[in-house]
Structure formats: structure tokens, C-alpha cells
Image (cartoon, rainbow, N blue to C red):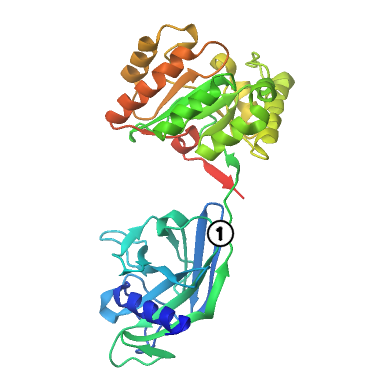
Amino acid sequence: MSRSVTRVALMLGLLAVGSQIARANGIGEQPLAVRAASLSQNGQELVWSVQLAHPFSPAALSRHHRSLCLLIERVANASVAGQVCVVGPRRGASQPRLEYTAVTASGPGHPAIIAATVTRANTSELSTSFLPSGIGRRYSSIRWQVVSSVSTQTCTGPFRGRVGCYTTFPGKPALARLHIPRLVGCVPSGPDVASHGPTNVREVALTFDDGPWYDTPQFLSVLEREHVVATFFEIGEQISTYGQGGAIERRMLADGDMIGDHTWSHANVSGGGSFAAGQISQTAAAIRKATGGFEPCLFRAPGGAVSPSLITLARSMGFTTIQWDVDPRDWARPGTSAIYGNVVANAHSGAIVLQHDGGGDRSQTLAALPQEIHALRAAGYQFVTVTEMLGQRLIYK
């Protein structure tokens, strides 16, 4: 059997388990005609857009035995990896969903709803965005093709198989070239200053000040081992000394951690003005150089010493000022058990926890960190960065 015949046979087998889309009025028993379609990358997400020749309703599912799917193929051998199909909204909702069916050598798997955003500019168009991981893919090139089908015995259409009639767009699979996204910034949003996140979500943001430092790599190793993210507020002048030529900062971003601005020399900038602006901008430049282009949007003043003028200045420079509401005073080295006990006792939904990875001997904090993580995780907390907690948008290239 030829490769093209094998691909079509697999495609038709998938369509038999695919989700169904309502037919548009007046089209009859033909597949819904695809006028245009594309698959591209936008930051971390894949964006699948499709325009049909007629209006259609994803909400009218099984009554008309239709499907509208994105066929995913492997570049190396043109074999089918799976398909993404549009399905109707869940009960009580209005947004359509995406359902993915993986294909292996053993055949199609079980369809599963994936996390996705689905929007419609009008009744004949649909645009979806989802992470490659949702369809079991990495950021490597893939081939794709849109398949529209109707599975009735009386159907007519360009192609017919054992499950009904179908049409494809484009006529031959197209290539989508993907690349590993690079984080280049974040967008300040919400209030100008924040000391905690939403209190109705069981999340905690661990933050570390005064790095990079000798111990920073060990902090990162603990976080990596525990699969936890954190936010690091860095002192600008220390980046060239302890940042290992930017390796520390790049490692943070690669791990999913966030980097914030903690002034150039840990100076008192509470008065705002040009001095504060210089301290903040110098550090932002050092972070940008170390990371190869990341622009921070979080600022923390040394000691938390702020004023309305400083907060306003920071926001004008593109920063949200971040305070905290859990402080174990680890800088005073009260002992590992005291640091651990303070963090766990005072943690709450939306807590921003202040600790230190630099500026002195941080061995007690380092020793307390895995204990904190285990206790908070056992209590049902999820660990997020400050940008995630505040719902701030990240910018990728």
C-alpha cells in the first residue's frame, strides 16, 4: 500500500471516531467546504485558523454527522500522529472545545479534550490556540491538513470512503515550522503594587531576594528537583560577578522561574526621582544582557521601602511593584526550623513569601526550602511565579 493511501486510510479511520459538526443550512449532505486554513506558532502556542465557505455551528453536534479536524503528521515519514477536532461546548457553556485523538502503530487512541482557546470572528470562521504539549508534540516542525467530513450514506463530495464523504485543505499536507519559544518579557497589569495574589486560589509564590549569589545554583537545583517555580529579584551589580556570564539567569528562565528587578546596588530608592530610575534601569539592562533579551516587569524595592512616587515611577518604567505578606526574616538567620515554621504557619491562598538566596550566608534558608515545599504541597498548595499569580501576560518570540 502506498504512503498516500495509508495516510488517507488512517485519516478516514480517525474521522470515524472524530467529533461531529453541524451542517450549515442549505448545504445538503456535502462536507463543509474549507475556504482557507492555517497553522502557525504564536509564542508558546499553536494557532489553527479555519474559514469555511458557509456559516456553521460547532454546538450542533451529532445530529448531522459532521466533523472538522486538523490532521497532524510527522515530518520524517509522513505518518499520522493524530487529529484535533472541533467539538461543541460543555453543558452550560458557550465556547467550542478541541478534542485530540493520538495515533500510534496500534491505531487511534481515545479522544480527549485539550486545553485551548477557541474564538470566532463570525459564523464561518474559527480560530483556536493550544500548546503543542496538548497534542503530545514538542516544538519541532509538523505537517498538517484540515479534513472536513460528513458520514451519511447519501453524502456527496470530492472524496468518499467507508465512513462517508470528505474534503481536505490544502490538497497536500502543509509544513508548519516550529521553534522553541524564547521568553523576552512580561506585561505589567492590574494594580501598580501588590503584596499578595487572589485569595480564592490555593497558590503560593516563593520569592528570593538579593541574588545572584554563591548559593543561587543550589536554590535552583532544589526547585528543579521538586518541580517548583519561583521568582528571583536580582541586584544588578551582582549579575556580572555571580551570574556565571548569564548562565544563572538563563537557567532560571529555562526552568520557568521569573526574574525581577531589585535595584543596582540595593540602595534606598524610596524617594523615587532620577536616582531610583537609574538604579532600576541599570538593573533591567543587566538582566536583559544576561538573558539575551528578557525585559523584566516586576520590581521590588530593597527592604520593601516604597512611596507613592516610587510606585508611580516604577509603573511608568514598565514595572509592577511587588511586596510580600509572608516574611520569615530568614536574613537574620533565626534557624532552619524557625524559617520553615514561619513560612508554613503563615502561608495562605495568594501568599507571596519573601526569602533570600543572596546577600549573606543563606544555608538556613536553603535547608528549609525543601521542607517548606513538601509541607505546602501536602497542604494542597500549587507553586507559581508572581507573574502567574497576578495573571500578567508573558511575551515570547
Quadrant into which the N terminus falls: bottom left
Q: Which image quadrant is residue 372 in?
A: top left
Q: Using the image, determine if residue 334 lies above or below residue 74.
A: above
Left or right: where does residue 155 sit relative to residue 144? left
Please give the name of the residue rendered at 64% of the width and 39% of the height, measured from the top-left corner: 294
What is the tally of numbered marks visible in this picture? 1
Q: Using the image, determine if residue 276 lies above or below residue 125.
A: above
Please give the name of the residue rendered at 54% of the width and 59% of the height, measured from the top-left corner: 140
Query: For this rendering, which residue is in front, 13 or 300?
Result: 13
Q: Using the image, determine if residue 161 lies above or below residue 169.
A: below
Q: Using the image, determine if residue 277 lies above or below residue 127.
A: above
- Percent x, y of residue 337: 35, 11
- Percent x, y of residue 57: 37, 73
Please give the name of the residue rendered at 32% of the width and 73% of the height, measured from the top-left corner: 18
Question: Which residue type carries mark 1?
Answer: Gln
Secondary structure under badge 1? strand
Q: Is residue 319 visible?
A: no
- Percent x, y of residue 25: 36, 84
Query: For this rendering, which residue is in front, 288 or 89?
Result: 288
Name the residue beneath numbered marker 1.
41
- As drawn, the residue found furthest toward the front would be 1
Left or right: where does residue 350 sit relative to residue 129? left
Please give the name of the residue rendered at 67% of the width and 17% of the height, measured from the top-left corner: 265
Query: For this rendering, which residue is in front, 25 or 363?
Result: 363
Q: Is residue 88 visible?
A: yes
